[in-house]
Image (cartoon, rainbow, N blue to C red):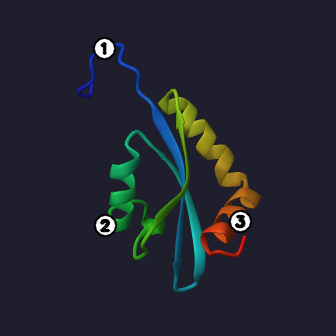
């Protein structure tokens, strides 16, 4: 059972990261079971290929009751360009 006792609640997180670097400000949306570990992996260059070579900060995160709900919310947030743009502006001190 992956080290968890049977029936244990498995919370999921969906998150939006932001990074300012060569090529301008970027955002990235993902989901995970361990937010701190996942952000550390992105910043160590072992996360998603598109996040390598940048320093990322959490702009937004939600804790959801299950892995499936986190994955579903990720799908929605990836398509919410207006939210990502607003988060990026606020992170840059422009919003």
Q: Which mark is residue 44?
A: 2
Name the side, left or right, on which 74 lies relative to 41.
Answer: right
Foreground pick, 93 / 53: 93
Left or right: residue 5 versus residue 32 is: left
Question: Taking 2 as reference, is 70 above or below it?
Answer: below
Residue bearing the label numbered 1: 6
Q: Residue furthest top?
A: 7
Q: Is residue 21 above or below residue 55?
A: below
Q: Earlier in the sequence, mark 3 or mark 1?
A: 1
Q: Residue at x 35, y 18 (%)?
A: 8
Residue 32 x, y percent position in the rendering: 44, 43
Tag count: 3
- Spatial distance from mark 3 to mark 1, Cα to Cα? 41 Å
Label 2 secondary element: helix
Q: CA distance from mark 1 to mark 2?
A: 32 Å
The numbered mark, 1 or 2, whose residue comes first in the sequence reads 1
Residue at 57%, 31% in the rendered image: 69
As drawn, is 61 to the left or to the right of 90?
A: left
Task: Quote the CA–CA distance across marks 3 and 2.
Answer: 25 Å
**Res 53 quadrant in image:** bottom left
Circle nearer the N terminus (3, 2): 2
Residue 85: mark? 3
User: Mark 1 Cα within 10 Å, few/some/many (few <14, many 20+)?
Assistant: few
What residue sits 36% from the left and 66% below the top?
43
Q: Measuring 64% from the left and 74% from the top, which residue is drawn there?
A: 93
| Residue 44 is at least partly visible in this image | yes
Quarter that holds the C terminus? bottom right
Give the percent coordinates (x, y) of residue 4: 27, 23
Q: Quadrant of residue 70?
A: top right
Q: For the residue labelled by badge 1, is the local secondary structure a helix, a strand or a loop?
A: loop
**Residue placed furthest toward the right:** 82
Q: Would you call the spot at circle 3 few (<14 residues within 10 Å), some (14-19), or many (20 or more)?
A: some
């Amino acid at each position: 059972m992956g080290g968890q006792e049977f029936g244990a609640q498995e919370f999921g997180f969906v998150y939006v990261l932001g990074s300012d670097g060569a090529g301008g400000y970027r955002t990235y949306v993902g989901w995970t079971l361990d937010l701190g570990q996942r952000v550390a992996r992105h910043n160590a260059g072992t996360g998603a290929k598109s996040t390598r070579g940048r320093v990322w900060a959490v702009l937004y995160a939600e804790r959801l009751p299950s892995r499936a709900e986190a994955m579903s919310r990720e799908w929605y947030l990836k398509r919410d360009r207006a939210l990502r743009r607003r988060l990026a502006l606020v992170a840059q001190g422009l919003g």
